[in-house]
Image (spheres, rainbow, N blue to C red):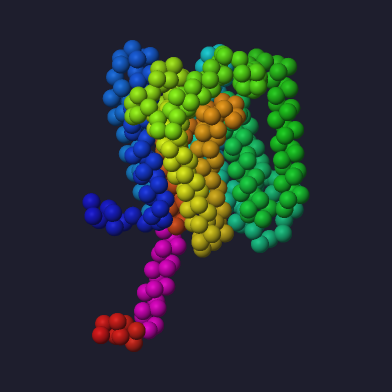
């Protein structure tokens, strides 16, 4: 065990934040899962607790394994895995999974294992690493927009096009993060304007096409439209019902909260252990609990920026921004949905919500960030060793 601890490298604060979030997630998940347990008819809430523990255990194994890999290897791996991601997204979309009559082709069943895997989450991480690789390649080179279309924007829009029909919110977040990474990477603003404008036109064309031919996407656009309409009209149905119950939970929590496990709205709020777990946390732990959770994610954002600034290469800086910022951005979106600031998106709260894919992909991203941070520590240690060799009198003086 001591040897395992000694092998842990990277930013200690990020390790601490991830561990603390994971520990704090157990009671809310255990409490909120009672709704699912009794809905499924077994009433076994402890089973959901164990399942969440297994997901987190495997997640931290992913962090440990990935952070031990020199981050420069991710450059080449992204070139390979981008094709794997495209294949997985095509297979996922062709499955034609439906929920409530709407297209929800987000999961793929893993053969011989029996669990489902959300391919869009994996695609997000791979795509951001791929974008960071290309942007670092052209960082000090003057390129035309035409030269970047095939190697950069074609894979980006192919991934987005395969995610968009079933998961608009995830596609939007990925696109925003790609644009942000391109901006930070020094990609010309006039080219970014073309990309953003082109993306908006493609989205509008897609929406109009599906509205004209609703059988193409099994009324998925109607789902998006109904979410926005219900959010604006505050009608007590569908997603508006979830928002209403979430607001009641938050209002019931007050400043101090009702206490661990004493949430009432968990019995009425759908997805209380995943999409709306923040509302349950505020209900049980009050304003202080909600603000503390917000502080943890903002602290993680601060440390991610620090790691990015201290990275030894442009690729290191961009990969940290590319895979690290979406974690915090997703958390803020989840909180904003719970308090009714934006329509329902289906985004989970990283490291807090139940769900294997969400936890594992968050841990994969954290592992990559820690790999970059670990490289910085190795360089500092190497410089210190070289300094001792170059200054033997200093070593002698310290010995005396």
| Magenta residue check for 381 | yes
Residue 97 in the image: above or below residue 254: above
Residue 359 lies, in percent from the top left, at 42, 36
Magenta-span inclusion, residue 117: no
**Nearest the eye: 262 or 215:** 262
Residue at (61%, 18%) from the top-left corner? 234
Q: Is residue 281 left or right of residue 398?
A: right
The C terminus, quarter of image: bottom left
Above or below — where is 105 with respect to 323? Answer: above
Q: Is residue 284 visible?
A: yes
- Image height of 330 relative to 342, above or below: below
Residue 324 in view of the camera: no
Of the pair 308 and 24, the residue shown nearer to us: 24
Which residue shows up at 50% across the image and 46% down it? 298
* Residue 198 in picture, x, y percent from top left: 74, 38
Q: Main secondary structure of the magenta part?
A: helix
Q: Which residue is pictured at 46% across the width and 19% down the height?
A: 269
Q: Position of residue 79 (x, y in %)?
A: 54, 47
Q: Nearer the viewer, residue 280 or 209?
A: 280
Q: Which residues are magenta?
A: 374-391
């Amino acid at each position: 065990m001591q040897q395992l601890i000694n092998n842990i490298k990277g930013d200690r604060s990020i390790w601490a934040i991830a561990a603390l979030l994971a520990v704090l997630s157990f009671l809310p998940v255990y409490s909120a899962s009672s709704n699912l347990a009794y809905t499924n008819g077994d009433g076994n809430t402890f089973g959901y607790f164990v399942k969440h523990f297994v997901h987190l255990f495997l997640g931290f194994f992913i962090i440990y394994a990935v952070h031990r890999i020199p981050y420069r290897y991710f450059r080449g791996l992204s070139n390979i895995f981008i094709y794997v991601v495209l294949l997985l997204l095509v297979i996922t979309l062709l499955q034609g999974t439906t929920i409530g009559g709407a297209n929800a082709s987000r999961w793929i069943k893993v053969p011989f294992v029996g669990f489902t895997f959300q391919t869009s989450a994996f695609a997000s991480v791979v795509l951001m690493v791929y974008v960071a690789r290309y942007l670092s390649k052209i960082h000090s080179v003057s390129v035309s927009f035409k030269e970047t279309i095939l190697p950069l924007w074609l894979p980006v829009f192919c991934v987005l096009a395969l995610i968009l029909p079933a998961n608009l919110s995830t596609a939007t977040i990925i696109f925003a993060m790609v644009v942000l990474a391109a901006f930070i990477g020094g990609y010309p603003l006039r080219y970014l304007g073309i990309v953003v404008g082109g993306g908006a036109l493609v989205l509008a064309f897609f929406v109009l096409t599906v509205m004209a031919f609703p059988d193409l996407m099994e009324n998925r656009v109607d789902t998006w439209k109904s979410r926005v309409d219900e959010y604006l009209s505050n009608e007590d149905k569908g997603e508006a019902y979830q928002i209403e119950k979430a607001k009641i939970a938050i209002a019931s929590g007050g400043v101090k909260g009702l206490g661990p496990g004493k949430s009432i709205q968990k019995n009425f709020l759908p997805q209380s252990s995943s999409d709306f777990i923040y509302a349950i946390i505020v209900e049980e732990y009050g304003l202080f609990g909600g603000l503390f959770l917000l502080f943890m994610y903002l602290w993680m954002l601060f440390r991610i920026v620090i790691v990015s600034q201290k990275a030894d290469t442009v690729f290191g800086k961009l990969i940290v921004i590319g895979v690290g910022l979406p974690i915090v951005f997703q958390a803020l979106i989840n909180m904003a949905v719970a308090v009714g600031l934006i329509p329902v998106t289906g985004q989970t709260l990283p490291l807090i919500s139940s769900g294997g894919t969400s936890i594992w992909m968050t841990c994969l991203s954290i592992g990559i960030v820690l790999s970059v941070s670990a490289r910085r520590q190795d360089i500092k240690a190497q410089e210190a060793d070289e300094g001792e060799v170059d200054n033997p009198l200093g070593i002698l003086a310290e010995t005396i």
